[in-house]
Image (spheres, grey):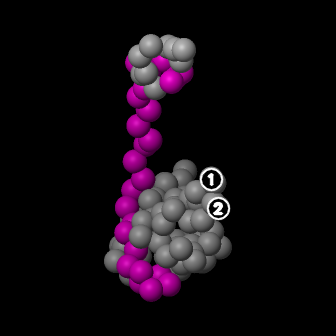
Amino acid sequence: MATKLFMGNLSWDVTDEVLQEAVARYGRTISARVMTDRDTGRSRGFGFVEVEDADAQNVISGLNGQSLMGRPLTVNLAREREPRSGGDRGGYGGGRSGGGRRY
C-alpha cells in the first residue's frame, strides 16, 4: 500500500524529478508530482508524493523543515480533498439576480 504525503513551501524551480530524488533518500517513492497552475504552467509551490506505507514516517521526519533549493519544506500526511460546495448557486451566473440583461 501507499501513503500520500503533502510537500509544501516548494521553490518555483522544483520539478517532479527533483522532488522524487529528494524523497528517495528517505524511502521508496511511488510517484511525485508538483502542482502547477493550469493557465501559466508555473509551480503552485506544493506537491504530493506517494511512498510505501512503511517509509512514510521516515520521509516526514527526514524532510520536514529541511531545505530543498533554498526553502524549508513542510511535509505531512495529505488530507483527503473536501467536496466542493456550490450546489446552491446553480452553476449559471453565480447567484446573480435578474436572470439577464434588461434593455
Residue at image point 54% right, 14% down: 103
Residue 60 image offset from top left, x and y in percent: 39, 68
78 versus 103 height, above or below:
below
In-front residue for pair 16/53: 16
The amino acid on which the numbered mark 2 sits, given as a three-letter code, is Gly
Residue at image mark 1 = 38
Residue 70 image offset from top left, x and y in percent: 44, 86
Residue at image mark 2 = 41
| Most distant residue in the front direction | 103
Q: Secondary structure at mark 1?
A: loop
Q: Quadrant of residue 77?
A: bottom left
Q: Which residues are magenta?
A: 67-93
Callouts 2 and 1 close, C-beta under 8 Å? yes
In-front residue for pair 103/64: 103
Q: Secondary structure at mark 2?
A: loop
Q: Is residue 86 left or right of residue 41?
A: left
Residue at image point 57% right, 77% down: 13
Q: Is residue 72 magenta?
A: yes
Residue 96 image offset from top left, x and y in percent: 43, 21
Question: How many neighbours does mark 2 have within 10 angstroms: few (below 14), some (14-19), or many (20 or more)?
Answer: few
Residue 72 image offset from top left, x and y in percent: 38, 79
- For residue 52, say whether it is visible: no
Residue at image point 60% right, 65% down: 42
The amino acid on which the numbered mark 1 sits, given as a three-letter code, is Arg
